[in-house]
Amino acid sequence: MDKLRSMEVFVAVVDTGNFSAAADALEMSSVMVGKYVRHLEERLDTRLIHRTTRKQGLTEAGAAFYENCKAALEQVRAAEQSVQALNTVPQGTLRVSAPVTLGTSVVAPLVADYLAQYPHVKVELVLNNALVDLIADGYDVAFRIGENVDPDLVAKPLPPYRMTICAAPGYLREHGTPRSPTDLAQHRCLGHTVWNHRTAWRLRDDEAEFVWPVNGRFLSNDGHALRAAAVGGAGLLLQPEVLVAEDLACGRLVRVLEEFAPVPRPVYLVYLPDARPRPKVRTFVDYLETRLATGHTTPASAPKMGRKRR
């Protein structure tokens, strides 16, 4: 017999005063109530209730067991209520993984507004360009850039990740404006240290394929550092559009070679499949899809994350 059910029946017998009243409260027969109590006594190898044809009373062992049963059943009810609450109201900690630039430029500003709408949710945003395992690393959702998405995950498409080539007006006045990718050889090109000839962004051209130079005079492992260098006139910059949106809007940086910019890469929000996703996950996914679909990625001056391929 079920141990937890037996404990519930035993507590009901003590609380109601007799087997018949407990049977009525539990909507079962008095015979079944007796079987549950006898099951407990046999399992514990001790008498819990003294009973005669006219009255019943707890033994010393029964009194101690009764108090412990009530405490245990209360904990079980509290555990059930906590899960039920998680399934009805957005609450708890939502762990989110995102690539560094996408996370700082797009995700973080949106998280701030999401938290204002859902005060019972706490978000832990971890920025890392490495591919995380949602189960092993304990994440609820993750942002992925690129075509390869684990088929075992639910993947919601977001606006594509668009790169832009730009430079400070002062740099262009001094060194000229490039007209084609072949002109890059005569320019200072800022590079990311993780880029190489295998992973570098490729420029679009109908006649040939050009790879963004990876051996420039200024290299960094951080896109924000490269952006700052470009604003200071250090050279041509190839970075995500969301990172330099405000600089482009106010003229600190100017777009160049727009028709040769790399093909935008797809972006997905991924999470584990669940027939009834927890409200914190469901509301976060719905919120991001709505905001990003309308172009609300960063402050009002920022453009959308990308545009569809033609």
Image (cartoon, rainbow, N blue to C red):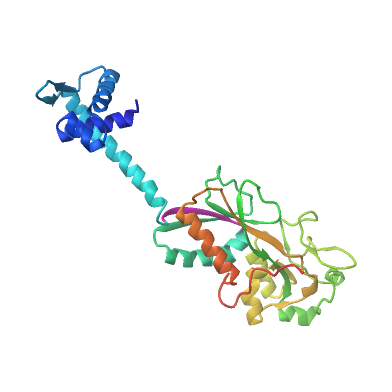
Q: Position of residue 33 (x, y in %)?
A: 25, 28
Residue 43 quadrant: top left
Compared with 21, 206 (above or below) is below
Q: Quadrant of residue 20?
A: top left
Is residue 282 found inside the magenta-colored segment of the image? no
Camera-side residue of 49 and 94: 49
Q: Is residue 72 above or below residue 93?
A: above
Q: In the rendered view, does 13 fall on the left or right side of 261?
A: left
- Residue in front for this viewpoint, 292 or 234: 292
Q: Position of residue 280 (x, y in %)?
A: 46, 56
**Outermost left residue:** 54
Which percent across, then down, holds residue 259?
79, 73
Residue found at x 80% / y 70%: 260
Q: Quadrant of the N terminus?
A: top left
Q: Is residue 95 rendered magenta in the image? A: yes
Q: Main secondary structure of the magenta part?
A: strand
Report the residue at 72% width, 65% height from top: 264
Q: Position of residue 258 (x, y in %)?
A: 77, 74
Residue at screen point 57% across, 64% down = 289
Can residue 208 be spotted in the picture?
yes
Left or right of 64: which side holds 269? right
Say which of 23 and 75 sits in front. 23
Asked if 146 appears above or below 109 in the picture, the reply is: above
Residue 67 appears in the rendering: no
The residues colored magenta run 91-99
117 and 48: which is toward the camera:
48
